[in-house]
Amino acid sequence: MSVVNVILAGGASRRFGEPKASYLYQGKPLYEHVKKQLLNEQIIVISHPNLLPFFKERGEQAVWLDDEQVRGNGPLAGIYTAMQKQEAEWYLVTACDMPFIRKETAEALSSYCNEHVDAVVPLVQGRLQPLFALYHRRCLPFIQTCIKENQLAIKDLLKKLSVCVVTEDELKAEANEFHNINKRSDLTENGMI
């Protein structure tokens, strides 16, 4: 099974006040906390234009902006771009603002990939976590349709797919793993700084 890790770092980070991917947490940018916990496969970064120099300075080789045709269409644009630019069977898509995910959880999630499902998505505390999930390449036409029809929420995409939902218990995930950082207070409220 061929897998590519995709770190989505193309958002504007308006609520946070600065690019989240480059924000230093425990001496490292948030995206590096994510990167070290992904599968042992190629990693690509879908970047915001302002962050291109930052990623290049850090030695990242596969860093792309959203494809011009879909730019500005949120996470779906990032997934679309990754699938268009890098051939693989599966794509482990992760938001750059989830610094507490664990490699063990990524590996457990990947064990649910099979030819009968289009996506493998965790269910944590009753909520789907589509920004730490695996998507098969056959999702691409569905992503294109969603973008064309301006259905930009990932939940709209999931309605069109055969989805394997995996609970946090099945993944043996830790409680805070799926906590994403939307604003600075998310770090201080949870005692993370």
Image (cartoon, rainbow, N blue to C red):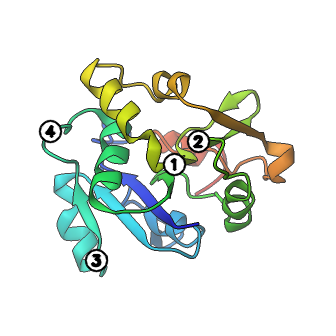
Pointers 2 and 4 in contact (C-beta within 8 Å): no
Separation (CA) of disc 1 from disc 3: 23 Å
Residue 53 vertical placement versus 19 (above, below) = below
Separation (CA) of disc 1 from disc 2: 6 Å
Residue for point 40% across, 31% down: 142
Pointers 1 and 4 in contact (C-beta within 8 Å): no
Residue at the extreme left of the image, as rendered: 68
Q: Which residue is mark 2?
A: 119
First in sequence: mark 2 vs mark 4: 4
Amino acid found under the numbered disc labelled 1 = His
Q: Which mark is residue 69?
A: 4
Given this view, does label 1 or label 3 mark the residue nearer the observer?
Answer: 1
Mark 3 nearby-residue class (10 Å; few <14, some 14–19, many ≥20): few
First in sequence: mark 1 vs mark 3: 3
Separation (CA) of disc 4 from disc 3: 23 Å
Residue 128 vertical placement versus 188 (above, below) = above
Mark 2 nearby-residue class (10 Å; few <14, some 14–19, many ≥20): many
Secondary structure found at label 2: strand
Given this view, does label 3 or label 2 mark the residue nearer the observer?
Answer: 2
Mark 1 nearby-residue class (10 Å; few <14, some 14–19, many ≥20): many
